[in-house]
Each structure stands twice: as C-alpha cells, then as structure tokens.
Amino acid sequence: MATKTQTPAKKKQKDSLFKRINSWLHLWLGLISGVIVLIVCLTGCIWVFNEEITNLLEPETKVEWQDRAVLKPSQLTNIAASLYPDKEPAYAFYQQGRTINLSLASAKAKPGNRRSGLTLLKINPYTGAVISKEVHKEGETDFFRFILNGHRFLWLPYEIGRPIVNYGTLVFVILLITGLIWWYPKKWNKSTRDKSFKIKWGASFKRVNLDLHNVLGFYAMLVLAAIALTGMVYGIKWYSEGLYWVTSGGDKLAEFKRLESDSLIRGKVYTPEQAMDGAWARVIAKHPKSTGFYYSFPDTAHVKTAINITVYPNKGQFYNSQGYTFDQHTLKELTRQDAYSVPYESASFGQKLRKMNYDIHVGSILGFPGKVLAFLSALIGASLPVTGFLIWYGRKFKKAKPSKSKTVVKPKLQVVST
C-alpha cells in the first residue's frame, strides 16, 4: 500500500524590519509611559467639566440676569475691606448668570504670588450680598485644583513632575503613530475590516480586550492627538516655539512680559478707586454683550503693577478673548506684543491657532458636544495603557498548552495460510 505523504507546514511570514521596530517601540514606550498616560487622561476627563460640575454642586451661585449695572471693582473692594481688613482683592471673575468670584490675597503677598492662601467670596453682582466664603490656607487646594495638579505634574514637586508629564505626552503622541501602524492590516477584506472597526463582544476576554485596545484607540486617535499636541504647547518650550513658527509662516513667538505702571505718577492723576472703576468702564463700554470678565486688581503695595482685564465674549470659550492692560496711576492703555493680546478678528492664522489652543485642548472649541467628545476620548486614552498591558501580559506569560500524547499505531499481524 502506498503511504500518504504529508505536506510540510507553511512557515509564517516574518514582519519587515520596520514593522518589528514599530512594534518594539509601541510595546516598550507604552510600558514606560503607561502610568503617566493613565493619570493625565483620567484627570483630564474630570477637568473638562469642572465648570459644569461646580455650577451643579453650587446652585446658590446662580443669579438671574437683570437689566442693570453690576458692581464696580471699587464696590467689591469696599465689601472685602469690611470683612477682611488685612486682605485686598486680587482677582474678580464676572460671569453672566452667576455670582462674582472675588479672590482676596494677603496685602503682604509678593507680585505674581497672590494666589497662595486665597480667600474666595461669592457675591451677588447686583446687590452686593455675600453668598458664600471660602478660606484656603497656604498650600491648600480644592478638589478641582487637586485634579489639575495631578494633570499637570502628577502631584509631584512641580520641577520634577512637570517635565515628566510634558515628555510623557510627547511619548504618547509617538504611541498613537506606532499604534496606527500596528493597527493597519496588511490586506483589506471583510475579516480584517471587522477586526479593525468592530468589537467582537461575544468572544473571549483576550479577544475583547484586544478589540478594545485596537478599535477604540483608532476611533479616538485624532481627538487624542489634538489634545496631546495642544497640551505640549504649555510645557515644552522648543515645541511651542516651533509650532508657532510653522503655523505663522516663520514668525517668532513673542515672550509674555508683565507690563508695569509708571510709579512716578502715583497719586497725581487718579485715586486707586477712580482708576479701578475707570478701567472697568472703558472695557465694559467696548464689550457690553460679553458673558464674562476677568478683572485683575492692581497691587497697591507695589506701585508698578497694572490693571489687567480679560474679556470673554462667549460663555465657556476662551479663543476669542481679549485682554486689556492699564496703568493704575494714569489709566493709559498699555499694549502687549504676544499672540494672546491680538484681537481674534484681526489675528493671523498662527495667532488664531494659538488663541484657540486651550479650547482645542478641552474640546470647548466645538461647544458642549466638543467637551463630551474630549471627555470620551480622554477616557479611552486612559484605558489604552490598561488594555495594552493586559495584551502584553497575556502573551508574555500565557500558560503553555499541554502537549497531546501521540498514539502509537501498532501494525496488524497478517496471518498467512499455507
């Protein structure tokens, strides 16, 4: 009898050198940066809706709009002095439909350090009634400040945690690129399309976990890339300057410089109260329909500080904000030269992109739906290190399958009759 010959097993085609390097980078960069990505994405999810959550938890801060003037800065100063004579106003945030948030700082605080040890008053913008008081000790933070600290520097000392987050974000961008290359199938057919775009929920845990990593990562990739690239603007100087140079057609990014008042004119033109209200009146006259104003009081203990007012035309968006700076002694308007100081309507493409940076980062550039999209994408981003680790762990430490024992077939004895 002729014996049946077995065909040799087909050898698996090896990936190209490029693919192997890409997979190696994706694996080890993911393992190294996994914890950083997890924390930054989770805290980013929460921070996206900080304003909405705060307003929901503080219904007493809602104030019906009235067709009359709101309190002037000098009136806020008087309210603060009656309650805390040892403190002075630092910042006031006017927001349509909400109480005024008035932050008080110690009169002995150094310029640029008036945020530490703040007392926050929430004041009715029409009646002056103090709705609530919050006193924060030196170094004390509220919930959302705690979340923001984790997002920016992992709750580590700033000089240590900040670079880790910055370059961890850069690594995350590389992971998105290598992940896309890893996700892209060699051939497109029905089977590869299903694996690339659908999650097979009824499959094993390993298969579902792999699909969650691949499919959700692909769908969230563009939004995550936008969030990461805009986030690096705030921390990596060479990247920020290079991005502005490219998008502005070769212009150099001007550094922010704190403008100063002319201390030699102190008390010769306006009293502090007149200057505060005068600057406010000018800005209000230019922007009567704006929904928010951020008023930075001059530090009376340091005569060179100025009055700064930022106007927010649209609620919940910052890209078209406009800043004004006034000499606290003469009310002369001081002009800045950085990209943020240019009115959005007259800004160049590079300047507009820079002014939109924060709104792109948190999704508010598309309004509330954009924030939802940013939230969901960041949540997926937080899941990627977890699902990726499980994929690696399952492959690295998978249990060896017991080998099947080979059955020995004994030849039958053939009886030959004589």
Image (cartoon, helix red, strand yellow):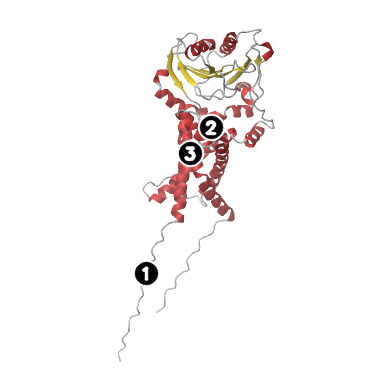
Q: Which residue is mark 3?
A: 39
Q: Which residue is mark 1?
A: 405
Residue pictured at 51% horizontal, 33% vertical: 149
Q: Which callout, 2 or 3, points at the residue further toward the start of the chain? A: 3
Q: State the quadrant of the N terminus.
A: bottom left
Does residue 370 appear anywhere in the picture?
no
Residue 414 % position (x, y): 32, 84
Amino acid on which the number 1 mark rests in the picture: Ser
Dot 1: what SS?
loop
Amino acid on which the number 2 mark rests in the picture: His
Dot 3: what SS?
helix
Instruction: Kindly check if marks 2 and 1 are in contact, taking CB atoms under 8 A apart as contact.
Output: no
Q: Which residue is mark 2?
A: 361
Residue pictured at 48% horizontal, 20% vertical: 120
Front label number (1 vs 3): 3
Instruction: Kindly check if marks 1 and 3 are in contact, taking CB atoms under 8 A apart as contact.
Output: no
Indicate whether 6 appears above or below 308. below
Amino acid on which the number 3 mark rests in the picture: Ile
